[in-house]
């Protein structure tokens, strides 16, 4: 006979409620980051030159602003992850306690959707990183579409001239 399954306590010492909480926190953080990303894109659009002379300055400016935005988002997520690991999930890394650069590295690998890391992450923190990977995919795709739109406008202007 199979043993009883206790949903609130698992082999790894983390309970199902902890994993559900990690999912909830991850979803809330992703929604908040999406809202910030929306307003950042609106700001880039507002402050980028609307008239283009075909030189590509608007493309370079948009690309640079998006790069800075994604670096800021990545660092923000790494700080958030560091606080989660330090206060709630201290045994999330195989080499606990991790240094900030370890958390930044793992966050960046997840955010960029590369998904490969030489640092092992365990427990509910994996779920949080999975959601951040989905968030990274969505934000990077959103930004790529935004950049492509800016390129199209510049290239169309150059073609018309």
Image (spheres, grey):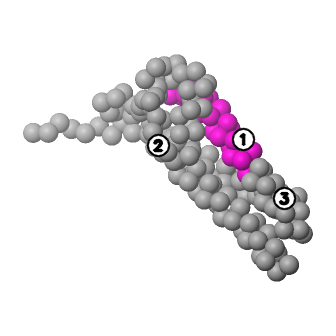
Task: Work out whether residue 18 can be spotted.
Answer: no
Q: How many circles with numbers are drawn on the protein?
A: 3
Comparing labels 1 and 3, the label whose residue is closer to the camera: 3
* Label 1 or label 3, whichever comes before in sequence order: 3
Q: Which quadrant of the structure image shows residue 88? A: top right
Mark identifier at residue 115: 2
Horizontal side of 120 relative to 54 (left or right) equals left
Q: CA distance from mark 1 to mark 3?
A: 22 Å
**Residue at x 44% of width, y 30% of height:** 118
Label 2 near label 1: C-beta < 8 Å?
no
Q: CA distance from mark 2 to mark 3?
A: 33 Å
Instruction: Name the residue at 60% across, 32% down.
Output: 104
Q: Quadrant of the N terminus?
A: top left
Query: Tag on residue 57?
Result: 3
The boundaries of the magenta stretch are: 66-89
Label 1 neighbourhood size at 10 Å, few (<14), some (14-19), many (20+)? Answer: few
- 33 shown above or below 95: below
Q: Is residue 11 magenta?
A: no
Looking at marks 2 and 3 on the same chain, the residue that comes earlier in the sequence is marked by 3
Can residue 97 be seen in this snapshot? yes
Q: Nearer the viewer, mark 2 or mark 3?
A: 3
Pointer 1 residue: 72
Most frequent secondary structure within the magenta stretch: helix
In the rendering, at what x and y percent does residue 136 appear? 58, 50
Q: Is residue 158 above or below residue 38?
A: below
Q: In the figure, residue 152 lies in which quadrant?
A: bottom right
Query: Real-space Cα distance between discs 1 and 2?
Result: 20 Å
């Amino acid at each position: 006979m199979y043993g009883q399954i206790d949903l609130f306590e698992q082999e790894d010492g983390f309970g199902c409620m902890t994993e559900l909480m990690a999912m909830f926190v991850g979803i809330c953080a992703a929604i908040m980051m999406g809202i910030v990303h929306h307003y950042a894109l609106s700001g880039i659009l507002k402050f980028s030159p609307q008239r283009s002379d075909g030189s590509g300055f608007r493309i370079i400016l948009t690309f640079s602003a998006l790069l800075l935005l994604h670096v800021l988002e990545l660092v923000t997520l790494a700080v958030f992850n560091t606080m989660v690991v330090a206060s709630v999930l201290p045994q999330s890394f195989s080499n606990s306690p991790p240094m900030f650069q370890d958390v930044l590295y793992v966050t960046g690998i997840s955010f960029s959707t590369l998904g490969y890391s030489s640092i092992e992450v365990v427990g509910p923190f994996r779920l949080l990183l999975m959601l951040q990977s989905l968030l990274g995919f969505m934000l990077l795709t959103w930004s790529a579409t935004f950049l492509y739109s800016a390129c199209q406008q510049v290239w169309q202007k150059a073609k018309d001239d």
